[in-house]
Every structure is written in C-alpha cells, then in structure tokens.
C-alpha cells in the first residue's frame, strides 16, 4: 500500500473518531437535559470518551509505522 493511501485512511479514521466524539457529546447533553445524568457525570463521561479516542488514534497511527 502506498504511503499516500495510508495517509488517506488515517485521515478518514481520524474524521470518524471526531464524528463519534461529537455524537457522544450530543447524547450526553440530551441525557443531562432529560435528567438521566448530572452535568458532572456527563462531563466525566465525555472526558473518558475523548481519552479512549486518543488511545485509539495513537494505536492506529502506531500501526502505520
């Protein structure tokens, strides 16, 4: 696989991760709005999701090398 193709795949993977985070944050906002969780719980969940996303992204990037 050519380097340019790998970069394309990595960019698509990164975009998918960012979109997933955005959707997760929207769901968490809804949960707070409907009283299913507190804003503090939602903030912690969001941080955890972002932490997992960074770990996944790092794993994908490391596989490239």
Image: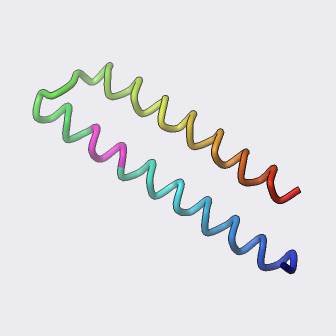
Is residue 11 left or right of 44 when viewed as pictured? right
Q: Position of residue 40 (x, y in %)?
A: 32, 19
Q: Quadrant of residue 65?
A: bottom right
Q: Is residue 39 above or below residue 50?
A: above
* Coloring scheme used: rainbow
Task: Spot the residue most to the left.
Answer: 34
Q: Is residue 8 above or below residue 58?
A: below
Q: Quadrant of residue 38?
A: top left
Q: Is residue 31 above or below residue 3?
A: above
Q: Main secondary structure of the magenta part?
A: helix
Of the 4 image quadrants, the one containing the N terminus is bottom right
Number of marks? 0
Q: Is residue 53 above or below residue 15?
A: above
Is residue 3 left or right of 55 when viewed as pictured? right
Say which residue appears at 12% left-offset and 27% top-offset.
Answer: 35
Say which residue appears at 57% left-offset and 33% top-offset.
Answer: 51
Q: Position of residue 61 (x, y in %)?
A: 77, 53
Q: Position of residue 39 (x, y in %)?
A: 27, 24
Magenta span:
24-28
Say which residue appears at 36% left-offset and 52% top-offset.
Answer: 23
Is residue 14 left or right of 61 when viewed as pictured? left
Q: Quadrant of residue 37?
A: top left
Say which residue appears at 80% left-offset and 54% top-offset.
Answer: 63
- Along the line of sight, the residue nearer the viewer: 64 or 14: 64
Q: Position of residue 64 (x, y in %)?
A: 82, 59
Is residue 58 left or right of 65 when viewed as pictured? left
- Does the stretch in magenta take in 9? no
């Amino acid at each position: 696989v050519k380097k340019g193709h790998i970069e394309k795949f990595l960019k698509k993977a990164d975009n998918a991760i960012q979109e997933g985070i955005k959707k997760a944050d929207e769901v968490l906002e809804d949960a707070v709005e409907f009283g299913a969780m507190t804003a503090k719980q939602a903030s912690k969940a969001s941080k955890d999701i972002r932490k997992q996303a960074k770990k996944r992204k790092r794993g994908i990037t490391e596989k490239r090398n």
